[in-house]
Image (cartoon, rainbow, N blue to C red):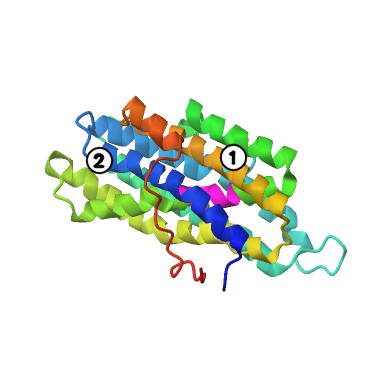
Amino acid sequence: MKISAGLKTLIEAAAPYWAGEAEVFTTYWSWDRRSRQSDRQWLAYQCSKEVWGSGLGSLDKGIFLGPAEELIAVFPRIDSGRENGVDRHKVLEIAEGLWAEFAHYCAFADAHDALGEAGEPKLSPQSVKLAWKEDRELSELRVKHRAEHPRLGQRATSFTEGGYCTLFSEGMKLAHQAGGQHARANALIAEACAKVYEDEFGHMLKGIVGLDRETMTGADWKLLEALSVAQLKLRILMRNSQFGYPLASNRLAELLDGKARPLAFDYDKAQLAA
Ligand SMILES: [Fe+2]
Ligand SMILES: [Fe+2]
């Protein structure tokens, strides 16, 4: 598929912020304040995102309970032929989304629990329900964008989902690094990230593909870019806090300014011809 000029501009606007998010992880992996406890903390926070959704769904139901209730509600209407009928493939998509996000939750929860010591309790969806401040701020911004601009707010949320998967791609690279004291944690993190990476790349693509099937005016593209960049900046703050603030404050300011070297978008993997 050949992409439009509008979509290409949007990707270029996002690329420095994706790189900024990636820098949180690469800085953290070799940070001298990294510990077993800090690894358990960010993994628990990641589990919170995988089950409660960071504003991808409704704030109180998240991305497990929301789709689960939706499946029950739509079941009697599958291909009913009535006006409120629901296509079976749409229902399969909801079920797949639920399965995928819960599989991600399990991957990170397994890594978290494997790093536990005797007497430390297993993680549960309820124990990670209260997201941290910066994640709540991202969630609330996404909800606000959808309320103010239903169509483009949803587009921006889908476009920024997963932040170009940099946590998962950078986490996977830990499998090939000499880990020293973190060797076991690195192996567990790399394994969890590898399980999640392909799914989340697909989720991001879903947010991108389809954009070019919609009628978008120049003003629409401008607004979508503004909403997306605002969300991507909050993603950097959310990640920095998730990992215990590994970035130096001057570097954080640069990254929020979009000064990172832009990440190279993989047009081939996205099956988009630039
Ligand atoms: Fe996920
Ligand atoms: Fe996802």
Question: Compared with residue 82, is residue 242 higher up or lower down, i.e. above or below?
Answer: above
Query: In x, y percent, where is residue 213?
Result: 68, 66
Q: Is residue 122 above or below residue 271?
A: above
- Residue 92 lies within the magenta run: no
> Mark 1 to mark 2: distance in Å?
27 Å
Q: Amino acid at mark 1?
A: Gly
Q: Is residue 132 left or right of residue 122?
A: right
Say if disc 1 is inside 8 Å of ligand 2. Answer: no
Secondary structure under badge 1? Answer: helix
- Residue 91, given in percent of the width and then of the height, sits at 67, 62
Q: Percent from the top left, x then y, of residue 79? A: 77, 69
Residue 156: x and y in percent read 61, 48
In the figure, is residue 75 to the left or right of 108? Answer: right
Residue range of the region highlighted in magenta in the rendering: 157-163
Residue 92, can we see it?
A: yes
**Residue on which the image places disc 1:** 55
- Circle on res. 29: 2
Please, which residue is most extreme toward the bottom here? Answer: 1
Q: Is residue 223 above or below residue 215?
A: above
Is residue 158 a member of the stretch shown in magenta? yes
